[in-house]
Amino acid sequence: MKPIHWRRSWFGKYLRHIPRVKNIRGTWLHRRLGDGLFRGELWHPTRRRFAGGMAVGAFFAMLPAPGQTIGAGLIAYFTRVNLPVAVAATWISNPLTMPLCIYVQYRLGSLILGHWQAEIPTHDLIELLKKAPIPFLVGVLPSAAILSLVVYPLTLLIWDIVNARMHAKQNPGNSGRR
């Protein structure tokens, strides 16, 4: 589906708010990154670039640092994966999912450090991070890498399933026979 068709689809009302090339040209972002910012490969979703954008966004989502979106956008730009998807995927870690992410990162760091059976206060995550920040910090990068390695093939699989269903919907007479 071409971008012009997206604007006419059911989610077109949301896409209307995304700035277009004519709005970005000449801004400080364009002056810093150059015309490479307007390459179609960064904006038009293809199977591998979409999955790559999801993996980059998932990696940055697990990092407990401000600027996740900016980091994911820059890495997506330099690795030439889908930039909007990478930016959107950083919202995997939102206020609802962050307590689970912190707990898993803490447990993974404890496992790496060999303190798996340590007594941890599960009722208060802030208290947990005050008492033992090292296991949490040790678990951040491995959890980010694991999540991005899981998200990439999972996104490819979901892309194939959605694409097959869309193709079956468009061609209802073809039931797999040639």
Image (cartoon, rainbow, N blue to C red):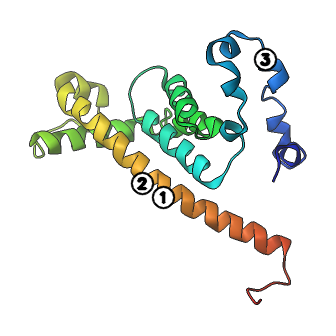
Residue 38 at what x, y percent from top left? 73, 29
Provide the residue designation for mark 2. 150
Residue 21 at what x, y percent from top left? 80, 25
| Image-quadrant location for residue 103 | top left
Q: Distance between the residues labelled 1 and 3?
A: 35 Å
Decide which of 166, 75 is in the foreground and name it.
75
* In the rendered image, the vertical position of residue 33 relative to residue 51, given as above or below: above
Tags 1 and 2 touching, CB below 8 Å? yes
Helix, strand or loop under label 2? helix
Which residue sits at x=29%, y=31%? 124
Provide the residue designation for mark 3. 25
Which residue sits at x=77%, y=70%? 167
Which residue sits at x=35%, y=48%? 146
* In the rendered image, the vertical position of residue 34 relative to residue 13, given as above or below: above
From the image, which quarter does the C terminus lie in?
bottom right
Q: Which amino acid does label 1 sit on?
A: Pro
Q: Which amino acid does label 2 sit on?
A: Val
| Image-quadrant location for residue 160 | bottom right
Q: What residue type is labelled 3?
A: Arg
* In the rendered image, the vertical position of residue 138 relative to residue 143, given as above or below: above
| Tag nearer the camera, 3 or 2 | 3
| Tag nearer the camera, 1 or 3 | 3
From the image, which quarter does the N terminus lie in?
bottom right
Provide the residue designation for mark 1. 153
Q: How far apart are marks 1 and 2 (CA)?
A: 6 Å
Disc 3 residue crowd, few under 14, some 14–19, many 20+, Cα 10 Å: some
Which residue sits at x=58%, y=30%? 77
Of marks 1 and 3, which one's residue comes earlier in the chain? 3
Q: In this view, does 93 lie to the left or right of 29?
A: left
Helix, strand or loop under label 3? loop
Of marks 3 and 2, which one's residue comes earlier in the chain? 3
